[in-house]
Amino acid sequence: MATDSGAANAVEAVKERLSPALEKLDETRRQGRRVMVRSQHAAEDAAAAAVLKIRRRPGSAVMVAAGVGALVGALVGFGLGSVARCGE
């Protein structure tokens, strides 16, 4: 029985020693969860706002999308052209 009592005392000592770290870890986990939920809500709000703007002015949305597509296409084309010239 002395061994059981010593083991129980050791377990209690370890729990007492680790308790502040475990509490801090749990608080950090809760804080991370709150940040994740806030970020998710912000992304949903931004998506809803984008949809609303597109529905209000579909012509502008198409023009912006075409302009961004042309810009990205030009950048990729110039980039690939530069890579091809460097290989020669």
Image: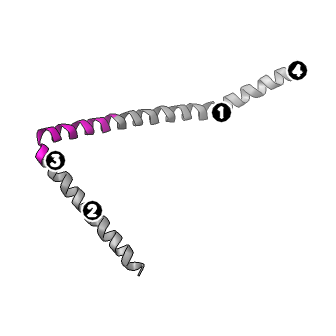
Q: What secondary structure predominates along the stretch shown in magenta?
A: helix
Q: Earlier in the sequence, mark 2 or mark 3?
A: 3
Residue depicted at x 65% and y 33%: 18
Quadrant of the image for the N terminus? Answer: top right
Specify few, some or many for label 2: CA neighbours under 10 Å numbering under 14, 14-19, or 20 or more: few
- Label disc, if present, on residue 73 of the rendered structure: 2
Q: CA distance from mark 2 to mark 3?
A: 18 Å
Q: CA distance from mark 2 to mark 4?
A: 77 Å
Which span is picked out in magenta? 41-59
Q: Secondary structure at mark 3?
A: helix
The mark total stands at 4
Residue depicted at x 83% and y 24%: 6
Residues under numbered marks 4 and 3 in contact, where contact means CB atoms less than 8 Å apart: no
Q: Earlier in the sequence, mark 2 or mark 4?
A: 4
Please indicate whether residue 29 sits to the left or right of residue 40 in the image.
right
Mark 2 or 4: the one toward you: 2
Where is residue 60? Give x, y as percent. Answer: 12, 48
- Give the residue number, with chain letter if any, for mark 4: 2
Q: Earlier in the sequence, mark 3 or mark 1?
A: 1
Where is residue 36? Give x, y as percent. Answer: 41, 36
Mark 2 or 1: the one toward you: 2
Q: CA distance from mark 4 to mark 1?
A: 24 Å
- Give the residue number, with chain letter if any, for mark 3: 61
What is the three-letter code of the residue carrying label 4? Ala
- Give the residue number, with chain letter if any, for mark 1: 18
What is the three-letter code of the residue carrying label 3? Ala
